[in-house]
Amino acid sequence: MRLGKINPVFSIRFNSLPANPESLLKSSVMGHHLWSPWRMKYIENHEKKAGCVFCTALEQEDGPDNLIVFRGEHAFVILNRFPYTTGHLLVVPHAHHPSLGPLEAAVRAEMMELVNHTTQVLEKAYQPDGFNIGVNIGAAAGAGVADHVHIHVVPRWVGDANFMSTLAETRVLPELLEDTYQRMVAAW
């Protein structure tokens, strides 16, 4: 049996399938390299900084360094520094709480309005096919910043969870974070 193009990134062709599909993955991918030099800054900075990343961002002037796209009365919108997809934004309350419950109703209402506006801005800027919108409350639920609740707004495109993310556990982002920031600010 002859297979055609398995993945557009690697364009691998095989004359026959091995008995063990796992060996197919290992034999086909191990010789290829994906360069992402911008990740070195993250890798070298392995020490956790004290304090909350969101509270620290709020103390800084808005720009490519803190990635805050918009500040509202009770909440703000910030780019995820380690996004799942290009345009991955977070809606965060100014108040530092681990869940939505302690927040005042006006804060939760503003957050939902910002989620709505964020999807409109992303539609204008990137024309995604859909969105994942969600809140991870607590480390057990997958919250990377468990002590300051936030809502993820992740634009999605048909086929964006391809071979690279599902099998190689690698995400390919076609745009630099700084460029995404500029595009989001301009579209806001």
Image (cartoon, rainbow, N blue to C red):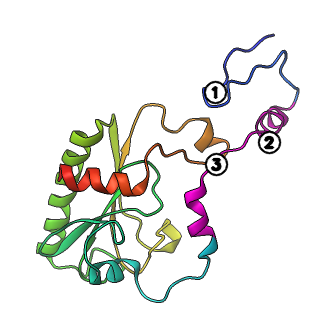
**Above or below for 135 versus 153:** below
Question: Which residue range is magenta in the image?
Answer: 20-43
Residue 30 circle label = 2
Is residue 116 in sight in this rendering? no
Residue that appears at 16% across and 74% down: 107
**Above or below for 140 versus 95:** above
Q: Position of residue 47 (x, y in %)?
A: 60, 82
Residue that appears at 81% across and 10% down: 1
Seen from the viewer's position, the closer of residues 64 and 73 is 64
Q: Position of residue 179 (x, y in %)?
A: 36, 52
Q: Position of residue 109 (x, y in %)?
A: 14, 66
Q: Quadrant of residue 147?
A: bottom left
What amino acid is at disc 3? Trp
Q: Quadrant of residue 78?
A: bottom left
Image-based side of 157 in relation to 109, left or right: right
Residue 142 circle label = none
> Callout 3: few (<14), some (14-19), or many (20+) C-alpha neighbours within 10 Å?
few
The residue sitting at the bottom extreme is: 50
Mark sitting earlier along the chain (3/1): 1
Q: Position of residue 60 (x, y in %)?
A: 29, 80
Image-based side of 130 in relation to 124, left or right: right
Label 3 to label 1, Cα distance in Å? 18 Å
What amino acid is at disc 1? Asn
Seen from the viewer's position, the closer of residues 72 and 108 is 72
Q: Quadrant of residue 128?
A: top left
Seen from the viewer's position, the closer of residues 158 and 68 is 68
